[in-house]
Amino acid sequence: MCIKILQTLSVFIFCCTFTFAQTSSKENLRGQIEKIAREAKGRVGVSLTVLETNEVVAFNPKQQFPMQSVYKFPIGMAVLQKVDQGVLKLDQLIRVEKSDLVPAGLRSPIRDKNPQGVSMSLRELLRYSVSESDGTACDVLLRVVGGAQVVTQYLRSLDVNGVIVATTEKEMATNEFVQYRNWAKPQSMIALLRAFQEGRGLSPSSRELLLQWMIESPTGLRRLKGLLPAGTIVAHKTGTSGTRRGLTRATNDVGLITLPDGKHLAIAVFVSDSMADETVREAVIAKIAKAAWDFWSIPSKAQTGP
């Protein structure tokens, strides 16, 4: 009897010690993130979740941050759902009029290549919007899908409440404060990334297509991808505002990082209202991603036990 009691007590002590070590280690990671965030000289919001284990580390996860082009990710999902429903077709031609082109100063390879307008497939518009972060493509897709309210309804169907799509790229270009109407909470962006990873709200083929575009995206190479080992799979969407009087209102990157053991780290990093230059802002995102990578990739006693 005494031996059984001692064995039970030993297991209890080990579990308590392991849980404490895990909690303490996560607090250390959060402390690292908080320290890195100070370099931004602005507001920083971070949410990290290993989707397969539900391990979470966060910093200001419930604050609202302007998304900028990050919102092209949920818009893309909403458009692809319409494809899955048969309302839209990937090969259908969409006319992009000259009047649809976003103004100079906004990123738009479509406008740069076709200053008089062009007709292109829905598939190409989606690729330009999600992978190339093309503002013209995004606005046309928002029109084709039925407006911001349709994207909002789609997000609510996934139980994602803290991601708000309200305006177009053109509208954001009229006033620097309009961008705050398209906002997200870091923890809510993780909820959307989880839905995407789990295949909710999209067919397998639509999910794979969107995932491919996010992996192939050439934008933000110094952000989430910046300090990760070569070959790391990162499916992500960036967002960036302009800079006025030294203030940059949005420098963002959100996505899914495949860890060495095959698990998936959902990560959302928003840097807002920052007085730091672009190199520093992007480095903040890269350093946070690297700290998370190290934490969940390098075995330690705190995570694996003795």
Image (cartoon, rainbow, N blue to C red):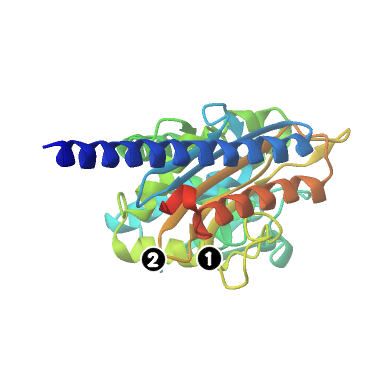
Kindly identify the amino acid type of the residue bearing the numbered disc 1. Ile
Q: Observer-nearest residue: 79 or 185?
A: 185
Expressed as whole percent of the image width and height from the top left, the position of residue 179 reads 65, 33
Q: Residue at x 35, y 47 (%)?
A: 195
Expressed as whole percent of the image width and height from the top left, the position of residue 245 reads 88, 33
Cα distance in 3D space between marks 2 and 1:
10 Å
In the image, farthest residue toward the right: 245
In the image, farthest residue toward the left: 1
Can residue 146 be seen here? The reply is no
Q: Secondary structure at mark 1?
A: helix
Please say if 158 is above or below 86: above
Q: Observer-nearest residue: 306 or 74?
A: 306
The quadrant holding residue 149 is: top left
Q: Which residue is mark 2?
A: 208
Quarter holding the N terminus is top left
Q: Earlier in the sequence, mark 2 or mark 1?
A: 2
Q: Which residue is mark 1?
A: 215
